[in-house]
Image (tube, rainbow, N blue to C red):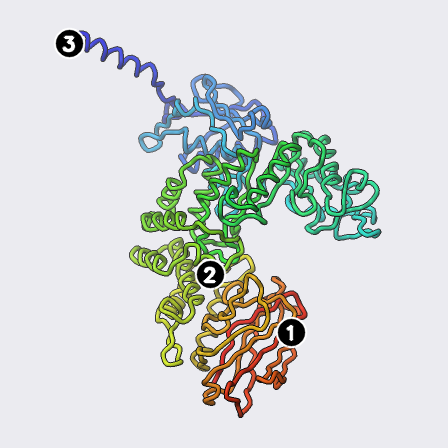
Amino acid sequence: MKKLFVISFLFCCFLGFSQQENILFYKKGVTKPIIYVTSVSNNLITPISNFQKQIRKALGLRILFSPKYDPNAINISFNFVNSETLKNKEFEVYLDGKELMIKASSNTNFEKAIRYIISDLLEVKQENTIIYLKNNKIAQRPLQTSFDYREVYFSQNFNKNIRAEYNTQYLELEWGLWGHNIIKWVKNEKVTDNLYALVNGKRNHDQLCFSSSELKNIIHKNVKRISEEDASLKRFMIAPNDNSLVCQCNLCLAKGNTKKNASPAVFSLISKMAMQYPSKTFWSLGYVTTKTPPNFKLPNNVGVLLSTIDCQESLPLTNTLKGKSFLNQISDWNTKIKNIYVWDYVVNFDNYMDFYPIFNSTKKNLQAYKENGVTGVFFNGSGYDYSILEEVKYHVLASLLSDVESSVDDLILEGTKKYYPQITDEIYEYLKFIEEKSQTKQGIYSSINEAKKRYLTLNKLKELEEAINKVPSNLRLNQFKIGVLFLELELMRVNGLNNEGYAFLNNDEIKLNVKVESNLNQLGKLLKLSQLYKISERNETFSNYLEQWKQLLIKIKSNPSFYDINISSETKLDEDYNNINILNDGAFGFEDYNNNWLVFSGGELRINISSQKCVDNVFHKIELSLLSDAKHKIFLPNKIQLLNEEKKVIKEISLINKENANPFIKNIEFSLPSSYSNKCLYTIKLFNANKSIAIDEIRFLK
């Protein structure tokens, strides 16, 4: 018994000495922390002011300046230090005696440190009358993140509190110049022709000469100006204009330029700027003419941003040929440069309501990036526009950027609990289901049919809709429901005339699925409450989408058509658009080219159609729909002919393509002759003088 007592006593002593007590930070009427500064430099005014505001907002505590050290209080000090001193960490917070030291390399990182203190270090007792510093937390400095630069481009990222919470960055606060915008600096100056690229013996104002002393002076002038205005803007993107032109002047050729490769001249200029401004970093894009690294080693403060736009298929990059090629590109750059960032894509830009399952593949890609020396990642999402469950996406993707080994399932559960507590289980199970189901590729510009092949089903969407309907509504749930209703309508539209389609046939009469009008009515009401407008990157709006449904319903009710016609093509169709039956399946195309349209890039398309009902004199017209979408190089045919079975032209229509920024649909009607042969065979011939034409439903009308 005595031996047991001694062991217990020693164990308790061990616990007592190993667990340090929390440190008193504030006690009402007894002690209060101070901000200890002997003098306030200009660069510390903003972080100290933010600290005071955030502490007061969170705890109701006013912390004042003091030029004198107080040995009886916690003395809070702020220090601007460079990232090398911090060993590339964003900030440090630790206790040195009675001094709480806060060190950071920028205003943005001070915000993160403040958030860290309020959320992790302070423990409030007795309704804010006593506040402790958690001593075990102070001993742990912030963990290194998987990547130095982490940005997730959804609307959440524009909120500084959310950025601080997730430890992410925002390009507007980090970059003095971004993208292909160097031309903006040039346009503000008086320059000579020698600043522009020499192409085919002439100076071309669509591209710059990166050996030009004028260009170097303009960059120097603006980097100096921006650095003086805001010292936190430390990254500058020096990239050619977005085209394939390469300067062929003697200076650029001497550096190593070829007709397709501008990297030698571009990175020679960037290297000079990097040596002139050692505290800044200078970048270019590994894109088009600068895809190949130069043949010389680059300074440590030079970086390259590589894009996955040509290989992002929502699968792990190690599983695809394009993906493996991209990883090889990273390896090639690794031999010449220290800093490599990746611009990646995490939504379907043709449909922001598409769930676009990508979490598991993104984790594997991030692991591959890290293994290949990538130091930063920019995830391109829907930006200022809403995309379905974007809050959960932001949570998962931002968390993976901090710790690439995190469990995807755990992050999905955390995100759904945090943002959708009323229906956490339903959303969590659905997201897990579609992640597991999504084993085929889907591009970042893809149709609803591709989502349907990959993961999207009407039954699962209806289950989500039912779950939403069972709980009280709010803005976030309303926005989510809009996405679900939209996807249901899209699936019904592309399914055409069948049990899961928008309608079915009953003796040649189209009977509308009651779910269609129900969804359209709900969608109209919810949109008035939700502040949602855009569906896609191409500025397609919900209001226009509802109008297209309205026109479709009018068309099928007022002008019935027949779906037992024979249809074939005399012309070889495009590889990706080779299903001729799409022209008479009852699934109508809207103004989005990648759903329900037959796109053709040849010079002449010949389509044969026939029907017994034509012989029986049941109908008297042929109608076909055409799409014009200039952005995607789809135009109206310049001429359409209707031929009889003897291949004689009996009708002809000429069309004029007008410059029109917005897509539109044009319906063409041919009146049929009053007499028919026994076969009632017609050929529609479309003449294409442009890159592509798009045709949809060919209908015989009464």
Instruction: Point out the tag, 1 or 2, that comes first from the N-terminus.
Output: 2
Q: Alpha-carbon distance for marks 3 and 2?
A: 76 Å
Pointer 1 residue: 687
Q: Is mark 2 on a helix, strand or loop?
A: helix
Q: How crowded is mark 1: few (under 14 residues within 10 Å), some or many (20 or more)?
A: some
Residue lying furthest left: 1
Front position among marks 1 and 3: 1
Q: Is residue 629 above or below residue 325?
A: below
Pointer 3 residue: 1
Say what amino acid the circle numbered 3 marks: Met
Q: Quadrant of residue 662?
A: bottom right
Say what amino acid the circle numbered 1 marks: Phe
Q: In which quarter of the image is residue 471?
A: bottom left
The image shows a total of numbered marks equal to: 3
Front position among marks 3 and 2: 2
Q: Is residue 182 above or below residue 595?
A: above
Relative to 395, 675 lies left or right: right
